[in-house]
Image: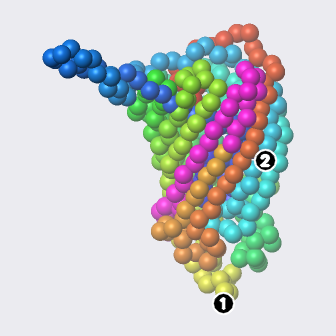
Amino acid sequence: MGARNCAGVSVVTAALAVMGIVCVVGLPAAGPAWAQPEPVTVEPALVEPATVEPAPAAPAPVWEAGLAGGIASVERYAGSSGRAVYFAAAPYLVFRGPRLRISGSSARLVLAETPRFWLDVSVGGWLPVHAGNDPVRAGMPDLDLTFQAGPRVNYLVLATLNSDTVLRLTARAVWSAAAPDDISHRGYVLEPAVRVTLLPGGRDGRLSLGTSLSALLGDSELNAYFYDVPPAYATPERPAFHAGAGPISYALSLNASWKITRSVKVGVYARVQSLAGTVVSDSPLVQDERSYALGLGANWVFWRSERKVQVLVPAATEE
């Protein structure tokens, strides 16, 4: 259910929105010119997008530290008609190690990396949902805090002077935690996505725009945890239901960020999500097949390491 997402609020997505950690990229290119023969009259150049070989990102500090904060409005879980608003303020950290990478609210372990391809292990999760806060789940067990981890394959399929297009496939195992000593395995998720990042002002510009399309698929165990209604909890208004394995939701995400100064950045985030036509759409726990999330945030970096490191993957596609 990632950065985006099945039942429950995606911690990573909400954190990205809350802290305004939104990165993206874009750009133009030159094409061939042509001229008329007699008389010799040069016509305007025909400009076509030109692909470029992806270049490593510019050297960056090994670590950066500061503060981040913001606000996000999200559905309680995918399919819920209830909403929750979250405010947050927290330390902001970026770390660019040989293997461990931390970027604001996301963390990953890099297993292999080239300018065009990288393989990492990423983490995510969803916030808990109290059944008492959602009438349709009244009398059912709460949805506990969940966390997930697994490999992610990334491939930069197209790079131009100020845009990148990345294909991404994430596979993760999911666990729920009712308490530190009460952790249960809840199944697996698969999330294919395509992400386009645009930088109208170039790689060193202040404005960053981005969009992504993704699908979230769960196995039968995971879908049952969020959307099944066992016979013991069935009522006339909430009939028994069992969801098999398959797609949970489809999402379109948009984000933008603006560097006010080298140290201060603000960002906005929006996501539209649909459960229509999925294996869980007929669950009585799904009240609204379409939902949205909005977020606004900012971060201020006031401490950087003097030592810099060369990162192969372009900064806008790192997260």
Query: Which residue is outermost to the top?
Result: 306
Quadrant for the C terminus, please: top right
Residue 68 belongs to magenta span? no
Q: Is residue 22 left or right of residue 192?
A: right
Q: Nearer the viewer, residue 244 or 155?
A: 155
Relative to 255, 139 lies left or right: right
**Which residue matches tag 1?**
236
Instruction: State which mark lies toward you, 2 or 1.
Output: 2
Residue located 58% across and 68% down the image: 289
Residue 82 appearing in the image: yes
Establish if 204 lies above or below 138. above
Q: Earlier in the sequence, mark 2 or mark 1?
A: 2
Where does the image place residue 119, in percent across and percent down from the top left? 50, 32
Q: Where residue 314 sits: x, y (%)?
A: 53, 24
Classify mark 1: helix, strand or loop: loop
Q: Quick check: marks 2 and 1 in contact, CB under 8 Å?
A: no
Q: Which residues are magenta?
A: 244-268
- Residue designated by label 2: 71
